[in-house]
Amino acid sequence: MQEITSNNPLIKNQLFGHPTGLYVLFLTEMWERFSFYGMRAILTLYLVAKTTNENSGLGWSNMEALKLYGWYTMFVYLMSIPGGYIADKFLGQKKAVMYGGFLLIAGHTILAFQDMWSFYTGLVLIILGVGMLKPNISTMVGGLYQKGDIRRDKGFTIFYIGINIGAFLSSIIVGFVGEKIGWHYGFALAGIGMAFGMLIYYFGQPYLKEVGNFIGNSNKETDKKVLNKPLTKIEKDRVIVLLLSFLLVVIFWGAYEQAGGLLNLYALEKTNRVFMGIEVPASWFQSLAAFFIIIIGTSVARYWANRKLKGKNASSIFKMLTGLIIMGIGFLFMSAASIQFEKEGSSAMYWLVLAYLFHVFGELSLSPVALSFITKLAPVKYASIMMGVYFAMTGIGNKLAGLLGESASRYGEFSIFTGIAVFCILFGLLVMLFRKKLDDLTHGAEDEEEYLIKNKKYV
């Protein structure tokens, strides 16, 4: 077993027990997610807002808005495959993140203009920008840790909290500006947030010297051997496990991403949003998931780490399946909300709060764990591409979410919410029966962590 050593510059240059570069990436991604989730919080609301309103929108139907939302969010993540490929073959992750950030700034800025050409052009630029930035910045996080470092999962959770600080702030700030002042001011504010992120990334480069560099034409003989060598049987098995785990990702995000579509519209149209005499903006409910992640994120990560320290089952596959089941349970609260709406004409806010809380418990057990899992199992020469495939599966999940949201117009919210809950719970329990076989196909990719834990050789 390889012991974690202290002669690596990433180990020497630390802050709060983690590589300093983690916090550079944390803040960069925080502002990128501020821009992305800020725009997402008001997109469907802008689309359905009547053209005759003082703060006029496009006047689309709910079905039309959810259809565009589904296509947009799918392509945002599908572009991660070419984004990862470009990084692996031509640029390296570090430069790909920089170019992606510039595209995002341009996209959000163009959305500030009130023309249909600027609306669609802005969406296209955002799609391209996220595709370049998202898979590569996540891969860089994994590169900050040596093989077998138990801190890797915690590092991804910290990184994930950064994502959700941005999401929380954007839903409150951009949501308020968009709904109460003007939709296009909200879009512009999202672009300003991305600009802050790129400034942090630029000035934080000294802490990222060892990660994200282009190695496709490396002069190092060791790098050439790694890049040119065909995949071994073990590597192929690990890729198979990753591809199978991506099925969980599609299902999870197909359910979870009702947040920006169906749940967003449900909060707007069917939820009693009056609290202490003040009407809560519908977009503010988008901040709940991010708020819960910030509050309980480290606690969930600590729970899984302590479970592993005690020798209990804490494999990535087990965590991901547990997350899917818990998230499914959260939709049962929305089923209850639908029943209350049918009886009383509106539903209470606490149903949405409880649903988002359970969704977050599920998300924290699946999403950051999946990101870390990829960096453990993916062959080095396909690291960014595999991360890109992960985000592409997230995109397909988003499209599935849009289709499910559209179908609510035909089948009703109760049927959709209950169907999602039952399917996620049963599917998670079914795959749990084959978990041991999937763990075996990783060929001990996570065993090194257990060895280092037992021998107290982790940092």
Image (spheres, rainbow, N blue to C red):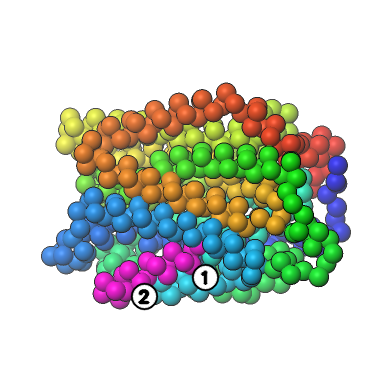
Q: Is residue 25 above or below residue 344?
A: below
Decide whether residue 66 is among the magenta residues: no
Residue 101, label in figure: 1
Q: Which residue is mark 2?
A: 110
Q: Quadrant of residue 236?
A: top right
Q: CA distance from mark 2 to mark 1?
A: 14 Å
**Residue for point 52% across, 59% down:** 80
Using residue 235 as the reference point, say whether residue 186 is left or right of it. left
Amino acid at pointer 1: Gly
State which region is magenta: 110-131
Decide whether residue 126 is among the magenta residues: yes
Mostly what secondary structure, the magenta segment? helix
Using residue 355 as the reference point, say whether residue 241 is left or right of it. right
295 or 4: nearer the eye? Answer: 4
Amino acid at pointer 2: Ile
**Residue for point 59% across, 26% down:** 434
